[in-house]
């Protein structure tokens, strides 16, 4: 799918552009927002490289990577980012990731964003399975994924190397046939 734009009740997802670099840097470059992510805060240059790669990946055939800017439903400056990566060997399945600028936390936006990503993946991309991995300590991500209907399915031991130590991940997933009851965005 090309030129993605999908809206829920209060959020919109659209393709990232180079104009979003500062907005994405406010997430990926922020020590609080990256506390539970498996990488150190990124420089503006690193974020820009990521956006360039995402724009290139958007042209691939078949397309496997969607990096989408999160805005209010009316548009405006991005305050978050959502990623959906379709597995090459299992194209019915995709991994998601998300991040919001910290001044937008705690108002249910993360939960709404996950619902909107699930709607995009199941309804528009016709995926069967969507999963996400979080740090065991990431309570906000845990609650947002659970409330949006992504069940906890297990622990991957020493899944990532973060800040000089091994870290487990907790995997959540949603299946297309279970998702119907959660799709009110
Ligand atoms: C994870 C994230 C997207 C959640 O966004 P958010 O808008 O704050 O989430 P919500 O407001 O929908 O909150 C979800 C639940 O977590 C709770 N919560 C939010 N922040 C919390 C915190 N720091 N500690 C404990 N609970 C928290 C909320 O009360 C809510 O629970 P409720 O539905 O029972 O009220 C956001 O914290 C973020 O961008 N974090 C940095 C990046 C990241 O960790 N991404 C996830 C990787 S898996």
Image (tube, rainbow, N blue to C red):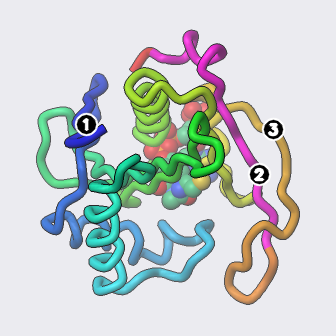
In this view, which residue lies farthest toward the front? 61
Q: Are the residues tagged 1 and 2 within 8 Å (C-beta)?
A: no
Q: Residue at x 28, y 51 (%)?
A: 69
The answer to which quarter of the image holds residue 136 is bottom right
Disc 1 residue lies near ligand 1 with CB under 8 A: no
Q: Position of residue 46 (x, y in %)?
A: 36, 83
**Residue 160 vertical placement versus 132 (above, below):** below
Residue under numbered circle 3? 153
Give the extent of the magenta segment.
167-183
- Magenta stretch: includes residue 82: no
Q: Earlier in the sequence, mark 1 or mark 2?
A: 1
Q: Residue at x 44, y 56 (%)?
A: 99
Left or right of 141? Residue 50 is: left
**Residue 41 vertical placement versus 160 (above, below):** below
**Residue 64 vertical placement versus 162 (above, below):** above
Q: Residue at x 48, y 17 (%)?
A: 183
Q: How far apart are the two marked residues, 3 and 2, measured between alpha carbons?
A: 8 Å
Q: Position of residue 131 (x, y in %)?
A: 64, 41
* Disc assigned to residue 12: 1
In this view, which residue lies farthest toward the top? 181
Whether residue 42 is visible, yes or no, is yes
Left or right of 167? Residue 74 is: left
Which quadrant would the C terminus be assigned to in this image? top left
Q: Earlier in the sequence, mark 1 or mark 3?
A: 1
The answer to which quarter of the image holds residue 151 is top right
Q: Position of residue 26 (x, y in %)?
A: 31, 70
Residue under numbered circle 2? 170
């Amino acid at each position: 799918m090309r030129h993605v734009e999908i809206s829920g009740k209060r959020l919109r997802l659209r393709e990232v552009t180079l104009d979003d670099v500062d907005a994405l840097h406010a997430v990926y470059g922020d020590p609080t927002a990256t506390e539970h992510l498996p990488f150190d805060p990124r420089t503006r240059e690193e974020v820009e490289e990521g956006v360039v790669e995402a724009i290139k990946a958007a042209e691939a055939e078949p397309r496997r990577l969607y990096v989408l800017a999160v805005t209010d439903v009316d548009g405006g400056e991005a305050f978050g980012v959502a990623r959906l990566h379709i597995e090459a060997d299992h194209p019915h399945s995709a991994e998601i990731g998300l991040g919001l600028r910290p001044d937008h936390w705690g108002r249910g936006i993360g939960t709404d964003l996950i619902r909107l990503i699930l709607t995009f993946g199941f309804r528009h991309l016709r995926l069967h399975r969507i999963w996400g991995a979080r740090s065991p300590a990431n309570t906000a991500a845990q609650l947002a994924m659970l409330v949006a209907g992504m069940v906890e399915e297990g622990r991957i031991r020493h899944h990532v190397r973060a800040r000089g130590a091994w870290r487990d991940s907790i995997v959540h997933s949603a299946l297309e046939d279970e998702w119907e009851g959660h799709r009110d965005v």
